Amino acid sequence: MSRIPDPTLALQKKWYGSVAERFSMHISDDIAIISELESWTYRELDLVSSSLARLLLGNRREGRNVIAIYARRSPTLVACLLSIIRAGFAFVILDPRYPFRRTKQCLELAQPTGLLNLTESEIPEDVRQLLRFLRTTLIIEVPKSKQDLLSSASGESELVREELFKVDDPDWLLYMAFTSGTTGSQKAILGSHGPVSHFIDWQQRQFGITRRDRVSCLSGLAHDPLLRDILMPLWVGGCVCIPEQDCFEVPNRLYEWMHENRVTIAHLTPSIAQLMLAGIEKRKSKQLVSLKYAFLGGEVLRYSIVERLRCCAPNVSIINCYGTTETPQVVGYHIVSRRSPDVPPDSNEHGASVPIGRGIDNCQLLLINSRGQLCGVGEKGEICVRTPYQALAIQSSAEDVTNAYFANPYRDDSRDLLYRTGDFGYYLANGEVVYTGRDDRQIKIRGYRVEVDELESVLAANQDILEYHVDIVGENERDRSLSLYAVLREGCGKKGSQLRVDLAAELPAYMLPEQIVVLSKMPHTPNGKIDLQELRSDRERSLEKDIVRNGSDGMGTAGAKLLGIFRKALYSRSINLDDRLSEVGINSLQAVELCFEIERALGRVLSVGEITGHRSIRELAVCLDALDQRRSDGGSVEMSVGSASERSDSIGGVEPDRSEHKLYLIPRNENLVLAVRNRVWQLLARVVPDVWRVKLHRMRGVRIGKNVSIGYDSIIETSYPWLVSIGDNVNIGMRATIIGHFRGMVRVSKDAFTVEIHDDAFVGPGVIILPGVRIGKGAVVGAGSVVNDSVPPLTFVQGNPAKPIARCGVALSRDTKYAEFIRKMIPL
């Protein structure tokens, strides 16, 4: 018996209350947010958000009130979102990495009442001019630190909460999100409280989510899935875990962060899941035993990713989710069985895509064929979403979007509407949907929806381009990409890489073509159409010439291997050795993949900064070949972040500033006077009063900040004290030992100290710290521990070797009461 959804059934619409109302039920000293440097309690979040909400209420104007947020991933973003909701305003999140053209379209559609700047830098002048034109008078530079926010909110009474706006209408505007339009302009999706509350309530009940859960905040800043990363834990009284930026840049760091923070729930795209799992098998990292649920969506999910995720997280349940920006939040789901009986027929299990499933409560996924009828099992049709929880409106300045909805032909109810998604699929016998792709010129790249028409509108406006064609390459969605063929005006002199720079100024990185071919003329068929077969032949010939040119120019082994690695990671064979790395459109996912591939192929462990710090692939290759040569000659070196060209710029002129890259040798034979002085001052520092102890270590060369305490009989790197850096407000217990070098170390970087102890850290009595260790801000090292690996910020470690045992709610500083420190500690 078929279990295809019945479109004649009436769907119920229910009001579950607002996020602000649910948040108010959890105000306590429980932890609400954990980030790199600090944690927030629900009481602190309540105080700051209610104070900001009161400020917004004083600037309410007639009509729609929208607040734009110039965002960064931080606890402050959570506080600002909550304050806007509690004031009854709507919010729109702007990603500062987007080019001005895209930001301009978003602001023109949003017409914001005000803007909150959360970034470290000032709002760009072109954005400020636009805000003045839009008559956005309320511009607030939000304090960046928790203490500054709490100080500005201090003195607020409990009456503030009672003065806040009460949302009791499910159709009250909550947010505006943006997606690509078919005419090259942005579409604004107006989302209300009702659909968000409906989804969160369903997710909580369906999967038993509680206040004990920790939810990772990994979604893109201007991507609507960010709402469930932040609002869902606030709804249940749980904890939002916000990663530091290096989680998206340093290989294996995201996985380690998930483990350190004991994340229990993660909303991921398959691309982010691959980033998290990259290199895990090789590094043999600890399993994510705390991860209970992984909700994946935004892209096609393959069983190969499911298998890898289960190997690393033995207790995880994996849910494939489906939804569009126009249908707020998730509207379909499929719980992946551990026995995998749900693999579609005539497909191998490993490469098959996971079904997107069936509708959540009071939502249906209907497949409509070309005749406007409901599809049968196995029949391909367009996915149409039927739900009473619809977007309030879809707005665009340049296109008609009214045809996105149409009346349900199976019921005589004008309010019963279906949304055409443009996605296609077919039903399994159990009534679940298998997604097969799109039949239009819209594709998905790393979870982002890309309208080819939006790219073409930018190309049409470029005065250097006389003729162009955008080709969608790839038979299936997994490896689909865009190629651009362009004929440029005579005398322009631009290359494909320079054309990419022009496009990057107008479009986000994920929308850039992965292959760009510049032609002298566009080939046409006899009937006047573009000859696509000839175009693709031109591309192949161009690529072959490029390979020959770059493979026969005398480059070493590193050059040939690096070129292949970059082309594979960036899905572009048109990249050559001399392209500037800042112009080839590397995103964070690709940068981390490059790190892993270089380590696998060349045995070099590089960070994202060490790759992008070079001007071209050629310069990176020259540097790696030089290092290989020095090692073969018996030397021992470490790679500097600076590029090869930066290290040779002084040949014809003024010596450049090398303060960030200069290398210092540790002499094989110590200078006798220096050695005696260091040891005598070290002996004195062990026994003199505390104030003199710090001064003596500074005189020895240890870099020490303000308000530092060093305990009796402590030893800090006897031979080379300049290898140790200690930040502000650090406490080091008695008889601690800090070792900055091992025998045989020959060269270290001036600004990459072998031991770094950051601000507000606490090092207990009898601790031994070995070279290569970084003690993060606010971290605590228990007495008697031996630290041989870096300690994340606000983490308590203990033992030999030291292992994380708790997260610290506050730093253990002079101003912190011990009882408060213990109360806010979260055991791992």
Image: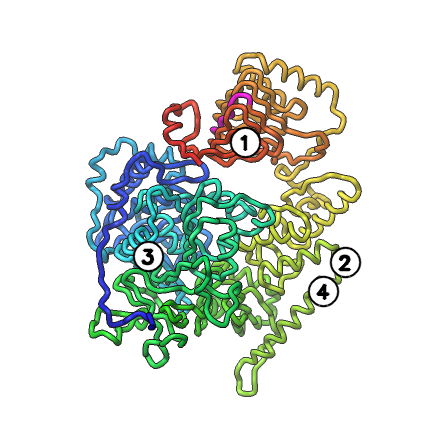
Closer to the chain start, of discs 4 and 2, is 4
Task: Quickly name the residue at label 1.
Answer: 802
Amino acid type at mark 2: Gly
Q: Position of residue 501 (x, y in %)?
A: 55, 60
Circle 2 SS class: loop
The reply to whether discs 4 and 3 touch (Cβ–Cβ < 8 Å) is: no
User: Which part of the image, by quadrant, shows the C terminus?
Assistant: top left
**Vertical relation: 56 (above or below) 193:** above
Distance from Cα at disc 4 to Cα at disc 3: 49 Å
Q: Are marks 1 and 4 in contact (CB under 8 Å)?
A: no
Q: Which mark is residue 176?
A: 3
- Evaluate if marks 3 and 1 touch, with contact meaning CB atoms under 8 Å apart: no
Q: Which mark is residue 554?
A: 2
> Considering depth in this image, is 262 or 495 the residue closer to the camera?
262
Quarter of the rendering containing residue 466? bottom right
Residue under numbered circle 4: 549
Distance from Cα at disc 2 to Cα at disc 1: 49 Å
Please provide the residue range marked out in magenta: 760-766
Judge left or right: residue 771 versus residue 340. Answer: right
Q: Nearer the viewer, mark 1 or mark 4?
A: 1
Left or right: 54 in relation to 564: left
* Residue 397 picture location, percent across and down: 34, 66
Viewed as shown, does residue 39 lie left or right of 197? right
SS at mark 4 in the image: helix
